[in-house]
């Protein structure tokens, strides 16, 4: 009954089992094993009731010297382990919704919980000293689960079995320097996980299933990170809020992030969020929505079959989204820099090589930068924003058609990283923008031809050198002129089958010039025009026309 304040096992040979319920005293009831030697246990199977705290003191060296099993522990108060021995205390019974906090307060005696815990509004697991609190029974109920490692022991509070699946949030609050470890899974009922300790890091190595209404990972600490390595799945959106100044304050590594939904970075701090794990094909969009906290994606991204959209949604601020792990998979990649931030979307280091299209269609004035290059699996690269330019400073491996599809605006598609590979490079400026497709910098040197065939009135400019691997250049647009201004070395002929080819510089024989370094003929068909605006003098190249159709102007 409630008048009893303590139950003690003090025999080395005779075990004590309490099979009836214990009603805890208002001032607390203590279960004690005082064996200095021997192996006798104090076992409780009938559960606890009442209002007050339950204290377990295993002062012996006996493993599970105090064992609570069977009926649930459900006193309205705290459960605290405070023994002075090296033996552990085991609670395999459920911890009911009336228990407000379960605490490991012993320096030497570990507390092992492998029964389920039911949250009712809130529940707290606390490791206060050097001994481990190991919980493996799973969490259910409704409310917030608080994790407090107030010790200096890394993993001093470890949740290793059963799923954490309370309908609510999980908050790490410890005041110690030791980390909290969650190696079990976190279920879809959990709506938020918060790192709120300035000293105790939170490490999540188990898998996380996102809630259908969304899951938010938040770091509000000033010095301790949240690390997630077990992967993220489920159906719903994932939000990352690094509200601190910590570099990589939220770090997701290891197993892939593959929730069927979006990933949004929207922290209020200046510290970035880092995803070095792969992003799987179930993810449909990645959104940078913080004015101060950048999003860095260091792992490979596999596009969704219906397309994956990368968005910088900042209306102000300077935070960018960076992808450096490359892009693969089958489907389209859509880039939307809706901000005014230069290089607001930056894809660097590894190339984009999805089997599908790449489209830039942001509504902001900030450009999108691809410095990692474009692989041979990409079928087209389209600039489709009236305000946000697309710059490709990494090499393009041909197979893709380069398109400027702007119906209005002045944004260009700029290529400075060169063109390599085997196949045809097709250029379609379907806009009215002068030099709407501009290729400068590193050489165009694909093994194949270069063809200009846009439907717009805007011109295409190639000022980069067209190299010796190129077998021919064709101007095939009646409306979109092509300008060659580089000192080109290609060895094939030049064909003008429609529209105008502008040559502002040298037309040479056997030396580098705008039309290459060969005496191969320039062929003009279908009313095409070769417009030479360079220095006066003879062309020095044979110019052939079909049935007399075609012009050479100067």
Image (tube, rainbow, N blue to C red):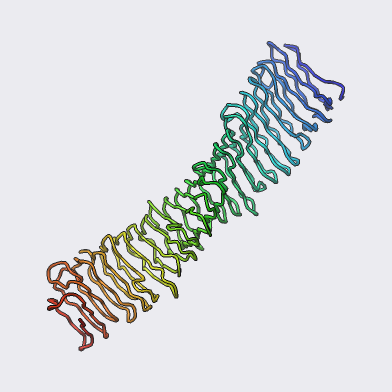
Task: Give coordinates of residue 193: x percent, y percent.
Answer: 62, 43
Image location (x, y in percent) of residue 124 = 70, 35
What residue do we see at 25% from left, 76% from top?
A: 502
In the image, is 147 to the left or to the right of 534? right
Q: Is residue 321 left or right of residue 477?
A: right
Instruction: Tell me which residue sits at (61%, 32%) in the image.
Output: 158
- Residue 461 location, quadrant: bottom left
Quadrant hosting residue 164: top right
Q: Residue furthest front?
A: 316
Residue 482 drawn above or below residue 37 = below
Closer-to-camera residue (297/63): 297
Q: Is residue 265 above or below residue 165?
A: below
Q: Looking at the image, is 198 positioned above or below residue 59?
A: below
Q: Is residue 406 visible?
A: yes
Give the left or right position of residue 493, taking residue 252 as reference.
Answer: left
Count of numbered marks: 0
Q: Position of residue 36 (x, y in %)?
A: 69, 11
In the foreground, 164 or 223: 223
Q: Is residue 20 visible?
A: no
377 and 340: which one is in front?
340
């Amino acid at each position: 009954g409630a008048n009893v304040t303590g139950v003690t096992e003090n025999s080395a040979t005779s075990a004590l089992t309490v099979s009836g319920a214990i009603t805890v005293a208002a001032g607390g009831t203590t279960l004690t094993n005082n064996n200095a030697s021997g192996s006798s246990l104090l076992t409780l199977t009938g559960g606890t009731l009442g209002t007050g705290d339950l204290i377990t003191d295993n002062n012996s060296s006996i493993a599970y010297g105090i064992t609570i099993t069977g009926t649930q522990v459900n006193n309205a108060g705290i459960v605290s382990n405070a023994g002075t021995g090296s033996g552990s205390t085991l609670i395999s019974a459920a911890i009911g919704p009336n228990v407000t906090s379960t605490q490991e307060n012993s320096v030497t005696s570990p507390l092992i919980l492998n029964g389920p815990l039911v949250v009712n509004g809130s529940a707290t697991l606390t490791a206060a000293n050097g001994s481990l609190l190991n919980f493996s029974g799973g969490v259910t109920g409704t409310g917030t689960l608080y994790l407090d490692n107030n010790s200096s022991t890394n993993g001093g509070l470890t949740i290793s079995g059963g799923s954490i699946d309370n309908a609510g949030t999980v908050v790490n609050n410890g005041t110690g320097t030791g980390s909290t470890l969650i190696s079990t899974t976190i279920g879809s009922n959990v709506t938020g996980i918060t790192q709120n300790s300035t000293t105790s890091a939170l490490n999540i190595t188990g898998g996380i299933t996102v809630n259908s209404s969304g899951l938010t990972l938040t770091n509000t600490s000033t010095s301790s990170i949240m690390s997630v390595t077990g992967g993220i799945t489920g159906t719903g959106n994932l939000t990352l809020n690094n509200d601190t100044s910590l570099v990589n304050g939220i770090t997701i590594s290891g197993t892939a992030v593959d929730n069927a939904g979006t990933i949004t970075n929207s922290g209020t701090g200046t510290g970035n969020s880092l995803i070095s794990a792969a992003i799987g094909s179930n993810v449909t969009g990645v959104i940078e929505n913080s004015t101060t906290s950048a999003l860095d994606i260091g792992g490979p991204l596999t596009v969704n079959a219906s397309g994956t959209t990368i968005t910088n949604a900042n209306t102000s601020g300077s935070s960018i989204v960076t992808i450096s792990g490359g892009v693969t998979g089958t489907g389209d990649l859509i880039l939307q820099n809706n901000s005014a931030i230069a290089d607001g979307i930056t894809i660097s280091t590894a190339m984009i090589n999805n089997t599908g299209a790449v489209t830039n269609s942001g509504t902001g004035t900030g450009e999108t930068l691809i410095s990692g290059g474009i692989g041979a699996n990409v079928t087209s690269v389209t600039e489709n924003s009236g305000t946000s330019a697309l710059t490709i400073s990494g090499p393009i491996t041909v197979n893709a058609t380069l398109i400027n599809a702007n119906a209005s605006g002045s944004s260009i598609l700029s290529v400075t990283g060169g063109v390599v590979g085997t196949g045809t490079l097709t250029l379609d400026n379907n806009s009215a923008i002068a030099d709407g497709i501009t290729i400068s910098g590193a050489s165009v040197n694909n093994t194949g031809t270069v063809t200009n065939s846009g439907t717009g009135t805007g011109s295409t400019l190639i000022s980069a050198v067209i190299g010796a691997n190129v077998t021919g250049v064709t101007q095939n647009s009646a409306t979109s002129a092509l300008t060659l201004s580089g000192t080109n070395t290609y060895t094939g002929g030049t064909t003008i089958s429609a529209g105008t080819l502008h040559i502002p510089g040298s037309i040479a024989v056997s030396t580098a010039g705008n039309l290459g370094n060969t005496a191969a003929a320039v062929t003009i068909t279908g009313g095409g025009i070769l417009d030479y605006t360079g220095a006066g003098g003879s062309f020095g190249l044979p110019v052939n026309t079909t049935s007399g159709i075609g012009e050479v102007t100067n």
